[in-house]
Amino acid sequence: MPAAGVLYQITPRAPVPIPVSLRDTLKILLEEELFLPGIDLLSNLLAQGIGRSSSTNNETIYVPPPIYISLLTTLLAHPHFTTHIPRTGRVDRDLSLLPAHAERVLRRYLALAGARGAGIIEAWRFNEVSRRRGMRGGSIGAGVMGESSEAFEDDKLDIRFARKESIFDRGDDFWAVMGWGFTCACAKGKGEREKWMRRRWEGAWRRLIGVALEGLERDWVERGKVENMLGGPEIAGDEGREGALVLKYLPGTTGSVGVRRVARAIFANGRGRMSGEWKEVWAGEAAAPSSAKRKSSGGKALNKKGKKGSKKGNEGDDKTGRERLGVFDESEDDYFSDASDTAGIEKRDSSSEDTISVGITPPPSALPPNAADAWGGLDAIELRQKIIMLLLDVCNNGYYLPSEILHEAFADHILPLSLWELPLFTTSSSLCTDAQAFILATSHQKNLADLNKYLLDALMESEALMPSEESEELDIKELVICYLPYGAKSGKVVDNLKVGFLIEGLMRGLLKSGRTDGVQRDWAMEALERGIERRKKNGGKILGGKKEEEMRARRWLEEGEQRLHMLVEEVGESPREVESCT
């Protein structure tokens, strides 16, 4: 079920411009950095716009110019509002509430106005500063606002968070932002930088990437509906999926270099060859703020009057983008639950007025091992799967490049995974129902099956038969003939385990869809028995050759074969759910 408070599958309202007087009030509030009142005004306008009738008797909704959507998006992740909140001057504790309020309003715009109606195609452009600031109403509203676009001529906000500090000016592109966000999610260790990187994920990047992917998915699905309504992609043109924002984010060249960079962003974990590829979006966001550093050094940098200390980071010194990064208010969000943080209770330091006490963290030994932790946790896995499925849907619908090239780029990251990590990217268990509200579940299952088939082909021994090139989708007959009787080409236990696991996943998909006709159960069982014998016969070592690990892997191999036996028993029967075999 969709999460409470989030709207799905709503027919988009027709966007209309905010009345001039209210737009002027909104502009003043935001330029004076009165963000909460400004967001409240936008929220009220959203409610007032619902149910209004335009000249065509369609339901309408008030939508601001794209620069306002850009600003709301920046508020989701900027250090000033998330992990490095200032604690001095006129800024108060309400600043920490902004990201949640901005996220709620953005998601409501996407749900009520749709991705196209909300104007994300203009609002979420990277590195097009002059064009985005200087565009006039007619060009910005083209295809979105229609005749009402003249009200959007003043598409400017004189505030640094909508200009030089905007995420769309600071980030190189969408993949650079995603790669850095996932790198923060996977930061390990007790070092100061790793601790702040984890806070950046929990407090900023998880929220922003989630909203961005919702916008990309909605935009893709809405444009597909336009194509169906108009009679095909040729007629729809840029109004259809050809003009989708996800295609604008993909590299202009369809060669392997650009595609592999996209894959590295999706699978970013901050280790190995990707340890230094993705950089901070805002300089200093992964470092402790200056006041926190003074506290850790014993407070010697400040005297009782607070007059001593470095001038770096003071107001006005924004050449490096630090913009007076303050101290993170740890009482507002649960950023202290990471297992790699120090255990126990950290008491409040009464000598410092800049920080608030940290909560309780269980010791690492008390936390169960989880393969998802290496990839930033289940939230990060879900977001990675969402973008993988979206890109596969793009390619399978004939856009960008052949899906085989994308499969190859993904396989480079998935095939080397351990036995514990492989299911994270080869099953739909990590893909929540919310994603299926945009792209049909059947499309997700087909895309995932195609990817798993490619992975299986890469692992299979050379003696195995290849499915017919003319078949667009794997059927039960090909699965029984080409995969069940064979093992992994390497002969290693770990690879045979992967082969069995992938075959099991494909078999479950065919059974759930009822596509198991045309194959006799005895024939399928005979093929399975040959495959079991072949996979058991092949030797090999696993995980450094440790005997106990090899024994455990062989036990898993036997358990997997038992599950395959139960699945083959279902072949030839009427379509049914096979959850009992899980």
Image: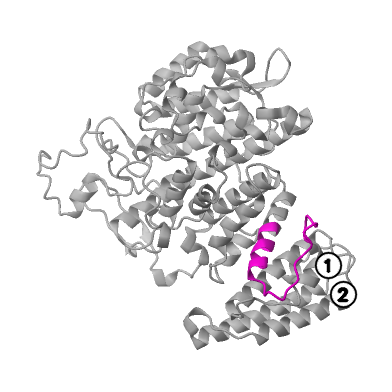
Tag 2 and tag 1, C-beta contact below 8 Å = no
As rendered, which of 104 and 225 lies closer to the eye?
225
Label 2: how many residues lie within 10 Å, few (<14), some (14-19) or many (20+)?
A: some
Which residue lies under the disc numbered 2?
A: 521
Residue 56 vs 573, above or below: the answer is above
Of helix, strand and loop, which one carries label 1?
A: helix
Magenta highlight on residue 464: yes
| Towards the viewer: 357 or 261 | 261
Q: Quadrant of the C terminus?
A: bottom right
| Residue 347 in view of the camera | yes
Q: Using the image, tell me which numbered label, if any, was put on residue 184.
A: none
Q: Which residues are magenta?
A: 450-474
Label 2: which secondary element: helix
Please report the residue visible at 77 percent of the width from the left and 82 percent of the height from the top. Answer: 529
Amino acid, disc 2: Arg
Residue placed most toward the observer, 166 or 93: 166
Q: Main secondary structure of the magenta part?
A: loop
Closest to the camera, between mark 2 and mark 1, is 1
Q: In screen coordinates, is 558 left or right of 273? A: right
Q: Position of residue 332 (x, y in %)?
A: 39, 45
Q: Can you see residue 202?
A: no
User: In this rendering, would 434 be left or right of 278?
Assistant: right
| Residue type at numbered disc 1 | Lys
Q: Is residue 97 magenta?
A: no
The percent coordinates of residue 338 (x first, y second) are 41, 60
At label 1, counting other C-alpha atoms closer than 10 Å, the crowd grade (few under 14, some 14-19, many 20 or more) is some
List the residue tagged with mark 1: 477
Distance between the alpha carbons at the discs numbered 2 and 1: 11 Å
Q: In this image, 69 relative to 243: left or right? A: left
In the image, residue 219 above or below residue 261: above
To which quarter of the image does residue 486 belong?
A: bottom right
